[in-house]
Image (cartoon, rainbow, N blue to C red):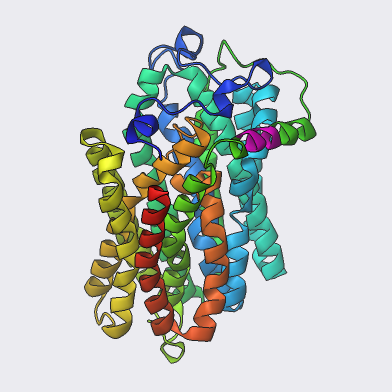
Amino acid sequence: MFSSQEATKQPLPSPLQKRGRQGAAVPPSFGGDGGGSSFGGAGGGYWFLTLFAAEEIPAAMVTYVALLMLLQLGLSPAMATLCSALLFMPWVLKSFMRSWVRRVGHFRQMLHLIEALLFISLMFLAFSFNRGSAAVFFSLLLVSLLCAWHELSARMYYERMLRPVFQKLLTTPKLAFSQVAIIFTYGALIFLVGTLQVYFRQIRYSWSVGCYVAAGLFLIFFFHHLIWLRSPRVGDSGSKHSVGASVKAELRIIDRIRHQEKWWQPVLILFLLLLPQGLMFHARVLYLYISHAQGGLQCTMQEIGFAQGTVGVIAFSVGIFMGRSLIKHYSLERLFWPMALCIVLSPFVYLGMTFWPPQALWELCLCTMTAQLLFGLGIGICRLPVSAISGARYRNTINMLQIPLVSAALLLPMAISGLLVEQLGFSNYFLINALCGPVCLLGIWLLRRA
């Protein structure tokens, strides 16, 4: 159906590369001297590391922390997971803004504007906790929208400032810095908020202080980029292009993809690969947080921040680096089934936890570490169907969850997970979640044979 060579070395030309001047993609030689052929010429200050790390601070709040915020504000698990899933909508729809962002140009100025707005939105989020859960949700939605916009602009700026050889060379350190930012937001920030709740006995005030801390750290990155970011010498001039025209351009691309032979196969394969993880994405946090009376582990915020947000994210990062190392030595086609098996094995860890609940923090950390390591080890295989659908468009996207196709595949399972937990209980839910994996593998096998 599609080969690993197409996904790793020379992706199939997609409608993204076949367009003319109205939608021209960046050619392989783009960047160069116009944007700095060396790291120093690109502006110094290691902006290529901090630019994406800074983005992960608000992005992690939307992706991981928002569910705990909404639960502590009194929302039911069903409503909390639904709202948390809706926060992924800007990532799903951001491709429709891609042409507009590219045409507007002036990427350095745009990044400064977006980061200033992100700081303001984080401050607004801190203020919104006294206004109720609806205000918090819409504040988070604004943060998510700005993060999606920032990712588009940062990726285009990055591709214009560095040659492709440097882009590839910097992928690993860029990913490492981004994961450290996630650990701070998902691990240290939750631990801080939990400690403040013990001390002040006020949930809303504690979350407000946590948002102030996140906003303060983000402000440091903003001033750093204000000093060190330089304007690209090529591909940075703006031109007239409306948002409506951008949406129409993306719809034309989707229509061209739909006319490709068996275009639906990689789409379905991607959905089946991510279905078990989508069902588990929010349910695992619910299981840790919800009380014993409702079938959960009733962990403290500090325990969740350490076990899931720190140990789990580190294990996930190790899994990603291990997967990337394997991909460098073996083809994606050879690794497809082993990596797909890793993804579907992850829910079995939580199924085991429902039968043998961890009695100590180290046991909980061991379980979350195993589940996240398997997920990180297998998620790289999703680039195979993504490349078959979109070509090389997302070659510089380091966070797989920020790829619209991946976000779209995860959104529905995440949205209904809380409702299913309420109706089935955790034991039955994780049993169905685990058994869903082999069924998905069978479906993928049939699709690849078709």
Tell me: residue 421, above or below residue 11. below
* Total numbered circles: 0
Q: Main secondary structure of the magenta part?
A: helix
Residue appearing at x 48%, y 55% in the figure:
271
Residue nearer the viewer, 303 or 319: 319
Tell me: residue 337, above or below residue 362. above
Which image quadrant for residue 439? bottom left
Residue appearing at x 61%, y 68% in the figure:
82
Q: Give how far across and how far down residue 74 sits, in percent.
A: 61, 78
Residue farthest front in this picture: 450
Residue farthest bottom in this picture: 293
Q: Is residue 119 left or right of 381 when viewed as pictured?
A: right
Q: Is residue 390 left or right of 162 when viewed as pictured?
A: right
Q: Give how far across and how far down residue 448 sits, in percent.
A: 39, 48
Residue farthest top in this picture: 33
Which image quadrant for residue 444? bottom left
Which image quadrant for residue 49? top left
Q: Does residue 202 show up?
A: no
Residue appearing at x 70%, y 29% in the figure:
100
**Magenta residues?**
250-256
Q: Give how far across and how far down residue 142 sits, in percent.
A: 67, 51
Q: Does residue 262 show up?
A: yes
The quadrant of the picture occupied by the N terminus is: top left
Q: Give how far across and how far down residue 246 sits, in percent.
A: 72, 32
Q: Is residue 251 magenta?
A: yes
Residue appearing at x 42%, y 64% in the figure:
276
Q: Is residue 337 magenta?
A: no
Tell me: residue 252, above or below residue 205. above
